[in-house]
Image: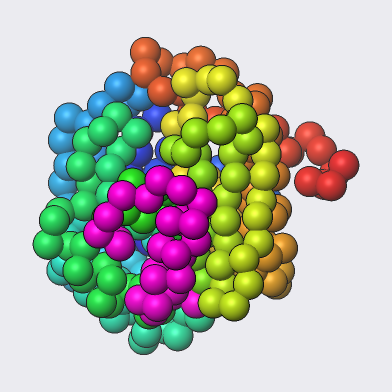
Amino acid sequence: MTIAGSDSGGGAGIQADLKTFQALGVYGASALTAITAQNTVGVTAVHEIPTEVIAAQIDAVADDIGVDAAKTGMLSSAAIIATVAERIRHWRLDRLVVDPVMVAKSGDRLLREDAVDALIRDLLPLATVLTPNLPEAEVLVGRALETDDDVRQAAREIVGLGTRSVVMKGGHRLGARAVDLLFDGQNFTLFESERFDTPNTHGTGCTFSAAIAAGLARGLEIVEAVGEAKRYVSEAIRRSQPLGAGHGPVAHDWLLSRQSLRD
């Protein structure tokens, strides 16, 4: 289940989540928290859904279909975060991926300043795994992260905020390889892939977190789920095609013609 706004335009946000769920063999359902008007270039409008409607959407899915795993994306206000957290506790959704969406690919702000504290206070303690990129991790710890040691120390501090584990995504860092770092409170695990020279990376964060949620829904352990998600999104970036005048979307459908991520 996705609990998020349409947090990035083009092929991202809710659209990216549902495409990812379909490709990875799980049934996706969504609860919209906000509607955006945007495309590959930028955001032109945002309309937040009333909190009672957000709660009703979550209840409708959980009460009828059930939820094996969930992920959150764009939760733009403290009130929305509080509502989502309360329904997660109510339905005891214990496999939760939190993607702390703060800024769109275009640079448009998607999380209010006052909502950062609510995210840390209300949502992180419920998370199985948090998936911040480098700028988001810097907001969470309140300082710049420049070295490998900086990233590892930040991972320890973020787990100390309440989440059971964190994946420090490496897409914003320099280097020939794209390196993500998983910390589960005890052990660090590195996930590496080729870095592709393409502007068509719209939806990578949504896709990655949705892929982790799909793995957890199918019963994978966190290390397995992150590894599968890394392979899936890396290939989706490699196979992406231009669409629109800005950052085009990744190719979510590449896996549908293949037998397995391990092929």
Q: Position of residue 220 (x, y in %)?
A: 71, 69
Residue at image x 54%, y 77%? Answer: 185
Which is more toward the observer, 167 or 18? 167
Q: As rendered, which of 238 and 75 lies closer to the eye?
A: 238
In the image as oriented, which residue stretches furthest toward the left?
114
Q: Position of residue 161 (x, y in %)?
A: 35, 76
Quarter of the figure with the C terminus: top right
Q: Is residue 23 above or below residue 4?
A: above
Q: Is residue 145 magenta?
A: yes
Tell me which residue sits at (36%, 86%) in the image: 90
Q: Residue 126: image x %, image y %?
A: 40, 78
Q: Magenta span has 111?
A: no
Q: Quadrant of residue 227?
A: bottom right
Q: Is residue 222 above or below residue 147?
A: below
Magenta-highlighted residues = 140-164
- How many labels sit on residues? 0
Question: On the rendered structure, is 234 left or right of 91?
Answer: right
- Give the side of residue 13 with respect to residue 78, left or right: right
Work out whether residue 98 can be spotted. Answer: no
- Asked if residue 119 shows in the view, the reply is yes
Residue name at image x 47 percent, y 21 percent? 199
Colour scheme of the picture: rainbow
The foreground one among 141 and 11 is 141
The residue lying at 30 percent from left, 61 percent from top is 140
Classify residue 69 as left or right of residue 245: right
Residue 124 in percent (x, y) is at 36, 73
Q: In this picture, is 5 found above or below 223?
A: above
> Most prominent secondary structure in the magenta stretch?
helix
Q: Is residue 114 left or right of residue 8?
A: left
